[in-house]
Image: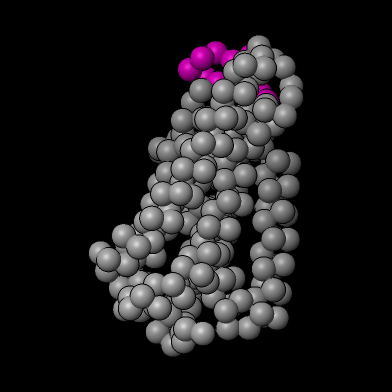
Amino acid sequence: MIKSFRFLLQFAWINLGAILAFALIVIAGAWCTGVPQGNQNLFATYFSTFPLLSLIVLFIYSFGLTTSNLNLALSFGARRRDFFFAVQGILLLYTGVCWMLQVVMSSIPFLFHWTDQERWQVLLSLGGFSSWAYPLVCLAILCLGGLCGMLMVRSKLLGTLVLILALVAAIAATALLFITADMFASGAGWGALPLILVAAMAGIVGASEYFFWRTMHRHIVR
């Protein structure tokens, strides 16, 4: 398992480096263009929605884990069981780094007294280290991306259909989050929908992991 994890880690560092670099560019751009003083520009939009943009990137990364990375690892002699558990470690690594970035970026406007705090409602509503919501969403998105990748390997038609449905659901969820930003910021949103959200995300994670396990053990490198 260690060898499989190290194999995946060489790709994960590149992916995480890209996310961290983008975060630094957004933060520096926001600071240099007067966003803390109230200017509204492209950097302000990227800053306020960075955790949501990260979810899209995570989806793409996990898609690659169960397609090209899977074929490469098995071609180099990796055991399917070891690769499965190595993937779990990479998923947790991605989730932890994006959670850390979300906490840091949501703290910046408050710590440095940026004006117009209401502009960051979506960012602040996701909570800090005490909130389980964002890391759970990250993990669910990662599993969903991996699921789409595995389905694409088995059947391009089925994989494409699931991929389209996943993208539509992601867009709808993002729009809902923007619309209900005030509710989430006050805690009312999570108070009204916790069971549904937890059940949906847990269902995605559980079904995806089960599918990963079965499919990886039957996968044939082509």
Q: How is the image coloured?
A: one colour
Residue placed most toward the observer, 191 or 165 = 165
Judge by depth and name the residue closer to the eye, 8 or 195: 8
Nearest to the observer: residue 180 or residue 207: 207
Q: Is residue 7 in the magenta section?
A: no
* Left or right relative to 157: residue 151: left
Quarter that holds the N terminus:
bottom left
Residue lying furthest left: 2
| Image location (x, y in percent) of residue 104 | 46, 30
Q: Is residue 81 left or right of residue 69?
A: left
Q: Which residue is pictured at 67% across the width and 26% down the height? A: 44
Q: Position of residue 72 (x, y in %)?
A: 44, 72
**Image quarter for residue 165?**
bottom right
**Residue 187 in sight in this render:** no
Q: Position of residue 186 (x, y in %)?
A: 59, 33
Please name the residue shown 56% across and 26% down the image. Answer: 27
Q: Is residue 217 left or right of residue 144?
A: left
> Residue at left 27%, top 66%?
3
Dividing the picture into quadrants, the one containing residue 168 is bottom right
Location of residue 144 (image quadrant)? bottom right
Residue 46 seen by the camera: yes
Number of marks: 0
- Out of 153 and 203, give the one closest to the viewer: 153
Q: From which residue to which does the magenta span run?
A: 109-119
Query: Is the residue 185 above or below the residue 139 in the image?
Result: above
**Percent x, y for residue 49?**
64, 37
The answer to whether 13 is drawn above or below residue 210 in the figure is: above
Is residue 114 a member of the stretch shown in magenta?
yes
Residue extending farthest to the front is 76
Q: Is residue 43 left or right of residue 109?
A: right
Q: Residue at x 54, y 75 (%)?
A: 150
